[in-house]
Structures are given as structure tokens and as C-alpha cells.
Image (tube, grey):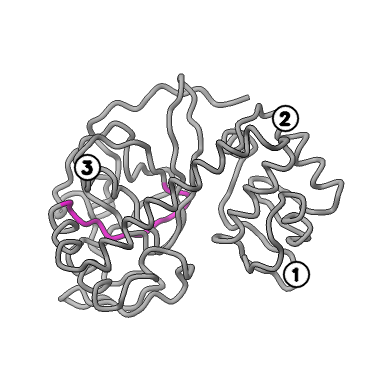
Amino acid sequence: MLRRTAPTPPGPVRSCRVGGRRAIAGTPRLSQTCRVIRSFPNHGEVGVDGAARRPKVSPPKAFLARLPTAIRQELLGRGQPCRYEPGDRLLVEGGVDTHVILLTSGFVKVTNVVEGFEALVAIRGAGDIVGESAALADQPRMASVTACGVVTGCLVIAEAFRHVLGRHPDAARLVTATVAERLRWANQRRADFVAYSAEVRLARVLVEIARTYGRQLDDGAVVIDVPLSQPELATMIGVAEATVHKALRTLRDGELIRSGYRRVYILDLDALRRMGHEPPGLSP
């Protein structure tokens, strides 16, 4: 059964810690809402001018990894490094703040409230950008973003973000491409709802998530490092929790996956791709 929640009103955002205490802010004043950290985890040390070396572990398709080094350094240098605790809301649906956050470690979940239910619509991880739509369109936030575990990021105010895009057409094109890719993902999920059964839709979503956030184990299995509950998987493929439970059991019985508490292990990725009508042979 989906978890019912009241829509989160615009306003104060529980975002960062200052000197060990949780700070509350609406439109963030960087010195008050973020605890300064001296380095971006997995992204190299950050100097006083904000320069940072190339990310070490960001997926190759992640936003930061695709930026030219000089532009990435400039963008990170214009922001404020922040740390978020598990369950913190980085962004709130309906909020009127317009900054962007460049994720430098950890995972976040992107959710919408639809008719009182909180639906998981996407996952983002190290190297990704969140909040870009509000920064570019100067419109209220379209979704909430919540930390799964400890997350670090770089908060960049909208004016600085737009300034970098204006100076660097390559960066502007990459932001446009990122928005287009996310729209493609959303449109594909809608098309899948019409064309495929719940089992096939689940297979397709797991392959997509594993492609970006999967990690291969010594035994050849691929673990999805993002904790996912059955209700969250249900909202991603548009079914009731009981239906996703049956779909997971079908995949387990076929020895395609094994699952534990909020964790999915893919045992045969190529077979899962075939079930989801995906081309084989792509690395997770």
C-alpha cells in the first residue's frame, strides 16, 4: 500500500547542519544554511578558489563527469560545499528557492506528491545535478529531493549558475541534454505502462537503475546501491504494492534477482535485459 503523505508546503527547508546543529532556511543564505567542508568526497581536494580535480567515482554519464574540467572547477568554485544527513530534504516540492545542488557523494530520491501519495520518480547520485529547472525557469520546485544516507553537495545560487552557463555554451548544452534525458526517462515510463506487464516494467526499471547505480560484486551479481522499498518500486512502475510484490517474486523464481531489506541484487543482468526487451551487453 502506498504511503499517504500531505503535500509539503513551500517555505522552510531542512537542509544542512551548521556547527553540528540543524539549520532552517527558505531561500538559503549560504553562510547560515551550510556547514563548510574542506573537500568534496571522491572529487579531490577543493582549494580556496574552489578548484577541484576530476571526479573519481561519478558515473561517466553524470553531469559533473561530462563537464570539461575547467568549467567543472569554475562551477564548483562558485558554490558552497554542504553536507546533508539521512532524511534531510535538499529541495521541497513547491518551494520558491532557485539554487541548484551538485551532488558530490551519496544518493538522493526525487519524489512528487500526487493525490496525497508520495511517489518516487527518480534517483540521483554523485555527479548529478538537482534543482536546475527552478534555477532556469524561476518557477516553484516541481519535486522534493531527499537524502538517502549522508549526502554531500555543492550549493550554487541561481545567478551564479546562469552566469556560468552564459559564459560556457558547452555547459549550457549539457544542462539542456540532461533535462532532455530526464524527460525521455519519464516518457519511457509512461509508454511502458501502456505496453508492458508489471514484471516487464519492473525488469526495465531495474536495468535502468543498475546501469547508473549498480555495482558488480565478486560473484558476478550486480547490487543496486540505492535502498529501495517495495512501495517505492511500485510507484516507479505505476502499480499497487501487492502487484510489485508478485513481480519481484516472479523475478526471484526465475533466478534473475534476489532481494533483501530495501536491497536488490541482480543475478543475471543479460536475462533481465531480455525480459525487459532491452539490448544486451551494456555495462551497468
Task: Give the mark nearest the N terminus, 2 or 1.
Answer: 1
Residue closest to the eye, 125 or 178: 178
Tell me: residue 260, above or below residue 121. Answer: below
The reply, left or right, for residue 203 in relation to residue 6 is right
Q: Would you name the residue on which mark 3 appears?
A: 137
Mark 1 residue element: loop
Cα separation between marks 1 and 3: 44 Å
**Residue 93 lies in the magenta-colored region:** no
**Residue 152 lies in the magenta-colored region:** yes
Tell me: residue 140, above or below residue 219. Answer: above
What residue is shown at x 30% (from left), y 40% (from top)? 14
Secondary structure predominantly adopted by residues drawn in magenta: strand
Q: Quadrant of the N terminus?
A: top right
Q: Would you name the residue on which mark 1 appears?
A: 220
Q: Badge 3, how many Cα within 10 Å: few under 14, some, many 20+?
A: few
| Amino acid type for the residue under numbered disc 1 | Gly
| Amino acid type for the residue under numbered disc 2 | Thr
Cα separation between marks 3 and 2: 38 Å
Please provide the residue range marked out in magenta. 147-158
Task: Give the mark nearest the N terminus, 1 or 3.
Answer: 3
